[in-house]
Image (cartoon, rainbow, N blue to C red):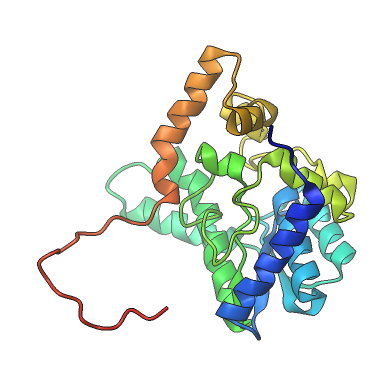
Amino acid sequence: MYTFDAERVKNEIVQWIRDFFAANGPDCNAVVAISGGKDSSVTAALCVEALGKDRVFGVLLPKGEQEDIDMSYLLVETLGIRYTEINIQSCFDAVMEEMRKKMPVEISRQTTTNLPARLRMAVTYAVSQSMNGRVANTCNLSEDWVGYSTRYGDAAGDFSPLAKLTVQEVREVGTLLGLPDKLVHKVPIDGLSGLTDEDNLGFTYAVLDKYIRTGICEDAETKQKIDNKRRWNKFKLEMMPSYPHEGAPIKAVDVE
């Protein structure tokens, strides 16, 4: 039977981060978009343990007024990391205004929902390039499994410490790292409708995590809902398909 060993996994992730930076930027900094939730908090804390606080840089990205931004401040203060705060409201407004003027159709709700996430990631990469950085992806396995992320938004990044950990496992690692309980167990809210992530998904992370690790989901309707989300969103985790052009040779050496 599978048992999660938080200390072993935490230590392995810390070493994995060190190995990644040794191979992909020995002098680079880890740049983390800080939302104040468990995932960005645990990711930042793991990077601090792996690289030291001087090599971790936080990016706070409110859109206008952010009611829970105090949680982001709490994290950067707890970890003692450098950070910047860049408000994306004016950028979002400018893009939306141009689209309203020039789009031949009405702007969809999906567009207004996902654009902030994509703007945040664009800004995070802009900061990272100026900070000699590598961008941390903060998604976890549970969210990835059902596609609860924005492609080229929060789903992007250069390295992903939590991608194989469920929500409950992320929380256990966060507790082990000594993060404040209010960060590790903060109820995630989508920031648009005021609904929690679980409200939007239609099932709890506890049910999803159990299904992922055991294959058991007692409620057939919920299982179908999870399976459908997995099927519809699996493309987000795959490389962009490309035409194979199999008849054309590539004779350049593909270095490792």
Q: Position of residue 70 (x, y in %)?
A: 83, 54
Residue at x 14%, y 64% (from the top left corner): 245
Residue at x 81%, y 74% (from the top left corner): 53
Classify the position of the N terminus by image quarter: top right
In the picture provided, is 252 more to the left or to the right than 239?
left
Comparing 220 with 197, the one in front is 220
Comparing 114 with 244, the one in front is 244
Residue at x 77%, y 46% (from the top left corner): 5
In the picture provided, is 173 more to the left or to the right than 2?
right
> Splitting the image into 4 quarters, where does residue 26 fall?
bottom right
- Which residue is situated farthest in the bottom direction here? 27
Q: Position of residue 113 (x, y in %)?
A: 51, 44
Q: Position of residue 160 (x, y in %)?
A: 59, 59
Classify the position of the C terminus by image quarter: bottom left
> Splitting the image into 4 quarters, where does residue 191 fall?
top right
* Residue 109 makes an appearance in the image: yes
Vertical placement of residue 235 versus 212, above or below: below
Vertical placement of residue 63 versus 219, above or below: below
